[in-house]
Amino acid sequence: MTILYEWKISSFEVKQTDGQLSKVIVTANWELTGTQQGLSAKVYGTVGLQSPDPANFIPYNLIPQSKAVEWVLSALGNEKVSLYKEAVQKQITNMQTPLYVQMLPPW
């Protein structure tokens, strides 16, 4: 069965002013959650974002979540995105077939 992945942004580090721009995001704190057959696993991290193009700047209060996730994925790059998905997949696999289990004494 396929793992359903969901990216979330938990917070930003914001530069109050940058030239003529205000509330410029410089760092994003993200979470990647994977869910499969009722099991969930998560990895999280921080990534720096590139300075925005003033011509395409989106005011902070108008940034949609989908755009922020797009920026994070772009900043991480395909290789790191794949590695984070693999880490989530390994966690779920370990839940499905754990290496260690708690057991009661045999008496």
Image (cartoon, rainbow, N blue to C red):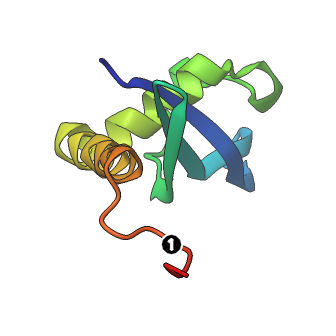
* Residue pictured at 20% horizontal, 37% vertical: 78
Element under disc 1: loop
Q: Position of residue 97 (x, y in %)?
A: 31, 50
Q: Position of residue 40 (x, y in %)?
A: 53, 39
Looking at this rendering, what residue extends furthest in the right direction?
61
Residue beneath label 1, please? 103
* Residue pictured at 60% horizontal, 25% vertical: 57
What type is the residue that disc 1 sits on?
Met
Q: In this view, does 54 lie to the left or right of 14?
A: left
Q: Is residue 18 left or right of residue 78?
A: right
Choose between 55 and 24: the one closer to the eye: 24
Looking at this rendering, what residue extends furthest in the front direction?
107
Q: Where is residue 71 in the image (x, y as percent from the top left)?
A: 46, 33
Quadrant where the image shows the C terminus: bottom right
Choose between 30 and 97: the one closer to the eye: 97
Label 1: how many Cα within 10 Å (few below 14, some 14–19, many 20+)? few
Q: How many marks?
A: 1
- In the rendered view, would you say 34 is above or below 51? above
Quadrant where the image shows the N terminus: top left
* Residue pictured at 45% horizontal, 39% vertical: 72
Q: Where is residue 79 in the image (x, y as percent from the top left)?
A: 17, 44
